Image (cartoon, rainbow, N blue to C red):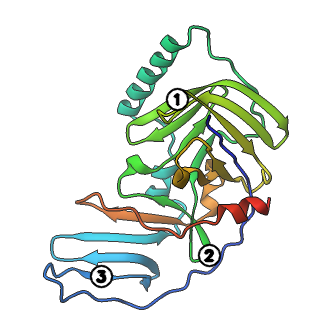
Amino acid sequence: MYKLLIILVPFTLWQLNVMAVQSTDGQPDHITTITNKTIHDTTFLLREKSKDYYHAIYIERNRQSPYYNSLLDFKYDDYENKEYKEAYQSIKQKHSAPLKKYNLTGLPKQWVPLHRYKNKYYIYLPSDEGDMGRMIITDSTLIYWSMEGPYPKPFQSLKKLNDHTWFFEADNFYPSKTTGTFVIHLIDPINKIAVFEDSSAPKRYRYSLYIAKENAKNFDLVVNYCETDKTPDFLFDKIDYAKLLKGK
């Protein structure tokens, strides 16, 4: 079964330390690389530059930036709308009865991942926008939004234990099981920061940190930019979820 635990916790924004420049001009490809360097008020976590190539991972602080808008735009494009409709039709064929709707008052509906780096928390726009990892909760489904598009998983049952705790049973995302159980535990609805725990997922994917869309602009954005190539994701710091959950 799926198990998803969501915990909302407050965080203090810490100042990012700026480190020294590292140069790789001597490499055969003549790419110059810098890490954790502030240039003209922009903090670069990584910048690789050559005559025909430019890749930058930097901290975006302008809340009106198009990169913020891209991450927080939950409207489906034509391809995503097509994929969602096809997935939903498949669900209707599998489940003969209409999907049951539940009251989720107090639970945010749209979520984006939150990451930690040097004791500070960031939202993140990857080089491949299909990897943004956003999630949507409706009154009848949990929607995983991957590079294949938004894929809904219908709730089979839901029990609200209190104002901050929900239990779900839903169709499983992983092929090893047919159904999964989620536990959603909100402890700080003001900050709307959440830990998602999925007990049926592989261990390394069991926990994820999320923030509700409406609060996402409270955090700086790490942008992984490359116009010509899809580049690897930035490696954020590992989060101690056991410690985080213990502090709830």
3D distance between C-alphas at marks 3 and 1: 41 Å
Label 1: which secondary element? strand
- Total of numbered circles in the picture? 3
| CA neighbours of label 3 inside 10 A, class few (<14), some (14 to 19), many (20+) | some
Marks 2 and 1: CB-CB under 8 Å? Answer: no
Pick out the residue farthest to the front.
176
Marking on residue 33: 3
Identify which amino acid the numbered label 2 is placed on. Answer: Asn
Say the numbered circle drawn on residue 152.
Answer: 1
Q: Which is nearer the eye, 197 or 7?
A: 197
Hey, which residue is sitting farthest right in the picture?
162
Residue denoted by label 2: 119
Local SS, label 2: loop
Q: Tell me which residue sits at (61%, 81%) in the image.
A: 15
Extreme-top residue of the structure? 96
Residue 205, position in %: x, y? 53, 51
Quadrant assignment, res 78: top left
| Label 2 – label 3 distance at C-alpha | 24 Å
Q: Position of residue 86 (x, y in %)?
A: 41, 21
Of discs 3 and 1, which sits in the foreground? 1
Query: The C terminus appears in which quarter of the rendering?
Result: bottom right
Kindly indicate the quadrant of the structure image that contains residue 113.
bottom right
Mark 2 and mark 1: span between their CA atoms? 34 Å
Direction left: furthest residue: 28
| Mark nearer the N terminus (3 vs 1) | 3
